[in-house]
Amino acid sequence: MPRTIGQIIRELRKQRKITQESLAEQIGVTPQAISRWERDVGYPDIIQIAPLAKAFGVSTDEILGVGSASDEDQIQEYIDLATKADSLEKSIEILKEARERFPKSYLIKVKLGNAMVSYNSRNTLQAGFGRVNVNSMMGIHLRGNGLIRPADGILDDLEINALAVSDGEKTAIMIAIDSCAMEWECAKEFKKSISEATRLPLDAIYLHAVHTHTAPFLRKTTSDTLEREYFQFVNRKMADASLLALADMKPSKMGYNVGIAPELAFVRRFLMKDGTTKTNPKINDPDVKRPIGKADHRVGVLRFDREGAESIVLVNYGNHPDVIGGCKLSADWPGALRREVERIIPKTKCIFFNGALGDVNHINCFPWLKGEERMSESAFGHGYAYSQYIGRAIACTVAQVYDMTKYREVSRVSFAEKTITVPTNMPKPEDMPKAHRLRKLYLEKGLEALPGDEMEQNTLVYETKRMIDFEHGPEAMDIQISAAAIGPIALIGAPGEMFVETGMRLKETKGWDLVLPTSITNGYYSYLPTKQAFDEGGFEARTSEFKKGVAERIVQESQKMLKELLK
């Protein structure tokens, strides 16, 4: 093990039989200072290195533990690189690398120490966390998958999790709720209530639904008594979670990293041999030609270390939480993820934001393991046990990168919203008689009365609803894009289900260390397919409320907004 500078001083002093008092007198410090150095409690100032070398009759290199001229040259190269670095964070990374390579170099220790002092003095971030329970009443409809399912039990708690961040001047709140989705009218009312309770501007409030299919769809414009009551309940809880997060704010440091969680999200759109596009074909379907698109296995992780309080972990990953089914409340795998992160990494609180998920889900249509070979229930790809498996697997990815997070100075919190007008997917008049007939058949006799297999039946339910809803317009609708930035990290959200390609393009936005896309943010409309997906057809394109081009417009406007936030 390399000797420390304290060990070198002690060895040289004893070799020359010099007392601590005598050495202290020669170099103009106290004997206590010499004692601290030798015990590695502190280090001499750089100006004291030459007097120490003179007192022992050695070179300054020997005091500093530099082994050769070559080492000295390389150390200087590191210092020059750190000096020329374009940011303080990069300089610190270079000096940390140099410290690992030359642990005996006192000069590197001094430079790194000074850089860290500068970093900490510039970092003004504060962060707080709030959590409340929002389990709904029994009997409320759990929507998704073309079915209306009255809740009849609780598998695990539904929650609102809130992260408040501040740079000392601006404060933002980012909220994730265990809901299937929230309509735009709900999001507006929630933001209004939060703003009134916290005195924050509306655009400083970032609302996201994690899209669990075993939770209610939040609606304000509903005739259902339970849905109206639940909306009012959640409205109050939104304000509560925000106030708790603000009251919990502490000085904080932030770091980030990206992990990989493979074999959890799978492409769900496939080109069939007959040229059609199908979502969720049967397992090992021989009529499948190839998958369309690809999954993004990256897990974005933000870590907030707070003074005298639990750390906060923000996780971003894109996949559908529709693993469980049935009529019991559950946050699905996002809830399991939060619980597992907090269990695996002590003294942490976890908040999750779902990413681009529109064309992926948990179903592996071509599994490598046959059903009879699977030992555990959690390996069957569905049900509550499998939701817990996904949560554990992503939590393990978080744990893998948690201690390797790259710290970033945060001297600025910023946020923005932009309203854009996009054309709607209005039906052709000649298609409406059939749409009305199929819709009536579904409402009177149920899903099984519709033609086709289960996936086609589901498609017809949502497609005919879209056609009837937009039979008489409007020809265009306003939707809102939202952004929240914490130093060099940005969250960017749209009110629908973004495709993976959209999320990947947003992650490539220049000027940011990390961009985290979030679906179903500040409202919900429908799927947001890419132009290619509209050309291919399939469930998502047939049911989308918007015309081709909506995804590309969202990317364009989002990147403009992110560019503005950099200024």
Image (cartoon, rainbow, N blue to C red):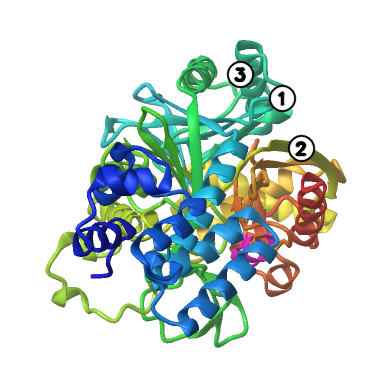
Magenta stretch, residue numbers: 499-506
Main SS of the magenta segment? Answer: helix
Q: Nearer the viewer, residue 436 or 476?
A: 476
Q: Which residue type does callout 2 highlight?
A: Glu
Q: Nearer the viewer, residue 415 or 487?
A: 487
Q: CA distance from mark 1 to mark 3?
A: 8 Å
Q: Which residue is mark 1?
A: 202
Helix, strand or loop at mark 2: strand
Asked whether residue 257 is drawn in magenta, I would say no
In this picture, residue 194 sits left or right of residue 476: left
Mark 1 or mark 3: name the one nearer the start of the chain.
3
- Image spot of residue 192 (x, y percent): 67, 18
Q: Which residue is mark 3?
A: 194
Mark 1 or mark 2: name the one nearer the start of the chain.
1
Q: Nearer the viewer, residue 343 or 252?
A: 252
Mark 2 or mark 3: name the one nearer the start of the chain.
3
Q: Which residue is mark 2?
A: 417
Q: Which residue type does callout 3 highlight?
A: Ile
Q: In the orientation shown, which residue stands out farthest toward the top? A: 197
Asked whether residue 504 is drawn in magenta, I would say yes
User: Above or below — where is 443 with respect to 400?
Assistant: above
